[in-house]
Amino acid sequence: MTEKQLADQAERYQSVIEMLGGYKAVTMDRLWSYIPDQEPRRYLYDLIPLYPQRAGKGFRPGLCIATCRAFNGSVSSVLDSAVAIEMFHNAFLIHDDVEDGSLSRRGQPTLIHEFGLPLAVNAGDALNVLSIRPLMENLSRLGPTLTWKVFTEISHMVKQSVEGQAMELGWVQDNVIELTAEDYLRMNLKKTCWYTCIHPCRIGALVGTGGTVDLDRFNRFGYFMGAAFQIQDDLLNLVGEEEKYGKEIGGDIWEGKRTLVLIHTLNRSSSAEKTRLARFLSIPREDRAPEDVAWVYDLMDKYQSLAFARAVAEELARAALEEFEVAYGGLPDSPDKQFIEDIVLYMIDRDL
Amino acid sequence: MTEKQLADQAERYQSVIEMLGGYKAVTMDRLWSYIPDQEPRRYLYDLIPLYPQRAGKGFRPGLCIATCRAFNGSVSSVLDSAVAIEMFHNAFLIHDDVEDGSLSRRGQPTLIHEFGLPLAVNAGDALNVLSIRPLMENLSRLGPTLTWKVFTEISHMVKQSVEGQAMELGWVQDNVIELTAEDYLRMNLKKTCWYTCIHPCRIGALVGTGGTVDLDRFNRFGYFMGAAFQIQDDLLNLVGEEEKYGKEIGGDIWEGKRTLVLIHTLNRSSSAEKTRLARFLSIPREDRAPEDVAWVYDLMDKYQSLAFARAVAEELARAALEEFEVAYGGLPDSPDKQFIEDIVLYMIDRDL
């Protein structure tokens, strides 16, 4: 890129960050009103705000609100739906950390690490049921038909996420090592893309247009963007700065997660390397040794698996930009439309 | 009781068992249609039917359907709501077993014991989201207003359950031993009564009357019945036959659960006994010794805590029968009305 292009891009990313921050702020403002200020505090309601309070980026509500606005809707009409998405996301993170045995989240201890397994599982359940409240609030503003359509979207979203989660957890539990990039992308579509990108866009447009647009136009856009987003997340887990990224760097290796990077390394490894890798992946997390984790890093490096994953993410982002034309191309120019276009590349260039 | 009274009661219990069985059968028939026949099977959808398939009693859907019928509604109008209650119940059991580290459920290994923590937590989440489907199906039969009212009931039901669960788990985790019967009953109201009795009755009447009856008339009835039910459940855990009861006998002692029996024993114990009991309760389940568990049993016996709990359950059942008049007394006689009255005593006389 020329110096001018770089400066332009930096400026656009700055706008993305500002708009994300603004939409996150209104989302969080509303979100707090759905967390009960009542007993039992110590064992439940004190735990619920902890993840939402920590610095998340607010991609999902941002994408949802911006899409609604790009389709000529208002922030207030879609806000409760965006809040619900963010709440489900945080509930999902609580259980995800339980299932993975993760130690840190957004720079602080995970709920399971800080409060133990039973209260963490229950807090996730509580946040799940609380997430239904904002969707019920939609009724007075959107009327029954649209409210039900949003509900149907959310129901599909959560179902896809648990299916994707099941695939990923099952691979770890059964120590599945014969996996392809396609397997990874299918799992990722289910686990990440629907709830991070596709449904936020669909719900934004549903509310913005009052249900007059075919929502399937967002499926390919959201899939490509979500896949790129997750691969970037996996890369940051390997090479990011812990302070910015907020999770233990290398945590995915410790947890044996089937990332695109690991799958690439597995498929390039010599037979001896693959055997050692399979053995490493077969033992419980707490029995894995730092020197073995370092060896896995070296192997990923040897086969340039990070560069491979990076190239796939870039390819997916390019595909997302093409699909952007299908999904949003016909709309009049607006800051929100621009934001959505810019966020595609931002997702793979971000360092947090 | 005279011989004649005993024979009458046996006959009424037989009717209760038959009606429960009938309502359970129609509930399960419909329930299966909401479990997807698709991938991922091995890591998700194969796990989902396991608890529902095992012999549960079907109290909750039975109470819901019978109440609807007693209020002149039809089975078909309330069936999806009853199915949703049963599905939420099973999802709750999956996470309850995870949180308690329980070994068996309904006579077979718990999901966490058989499939590991990650897949069990995720299966509970999946069953939770699947439970929303039958509630959405209500729309075509009940229309938007009633459908939303049922939804609101369910949302309150799940919220109460996680709050009660938080209290119980917190007491175990912090090894709280200064507890009274009132603390127990408050926890039990939240954890058990709302979702086992109060909301099944409320939803049944809501659908049966099309929303024309004040649902709060069921609150006291359901509270008394639910509390009696749970105390009987706790007693069966201590003295039941494992084959009938389906859980490890004494499992609650192993898990350190704050049952009414344990609380009574704690409050009667000498200072030395209380210290030993507190120490027993403070160590992790897997470090508890069988001889210590036996000693707890003996202490419960010494202070006649089982007899105390039994007396409380009987008192609660009597109170429920009085409240039955408030809740159902004005209705014309019917087999369903009779079933609901008879189930009150059946709940504390059952051995499974």
Image (cartoon, coloured by chain):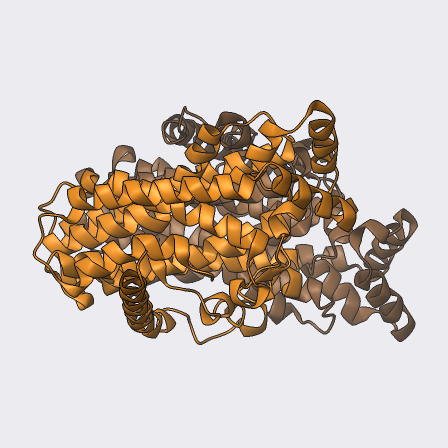
Chain colours: A brown, B orange
Quadrant into which the N terminus of chain B falls: bottom left
Q: Is residue B241 left or right of residue A276?
A: left
| Residue B73 visible within the image | yes
Q: Which residue occupies the foreground of this view, A88 or B72?
A: B72
Task: Identify the residue shown where x is 36% and y is 36%.
Answer: A335
Task: Identify the residue shown where x is 39% and y is 60%.
Answer: B87
Q: Which residue occupies the foreground of this view, B168 or A178?
A: B168
Q: Residue furthest front?
A: B2
The x, y position of residue B207, in whole percent, is 16, 55
- In the rendered image, which quarter is residue A273 located in? bottom right
The x, y position of residue A337, in whole percent, is 36, 43
Task: Identify the residue shown where x is 42% and y is 72%.
Answer: B36
- In the rendered image, which quarter is residue A118 located in? top right
Q: Which residue occupies the foreground of this view, B31 or A243?
A: B31
| Residue A323 visible within the image | no
> How many marks are shown on the rendered structure?
0
The x, y position of residue A170, in whole percent, is 64, 65
Q: Which residue occupies the foreground of this view, A62 or B13?
A: B13
Indicate whether A323 appears above or below B218.
Answer: below
Task: Identify the residue shown where x is 54% and y is 50%.
Answer: B96
Q: Is residue A296 left or right of residue A178?
A: right
Q: Is residue A333 left or right of residue A91?
A: left
Indicate whether A29 appears above or below A63.
Answer: above
Q: Is residue B15 left or right of residue A4?
A: left
The x, y position of residue B236, in whole percent, is 52, 54
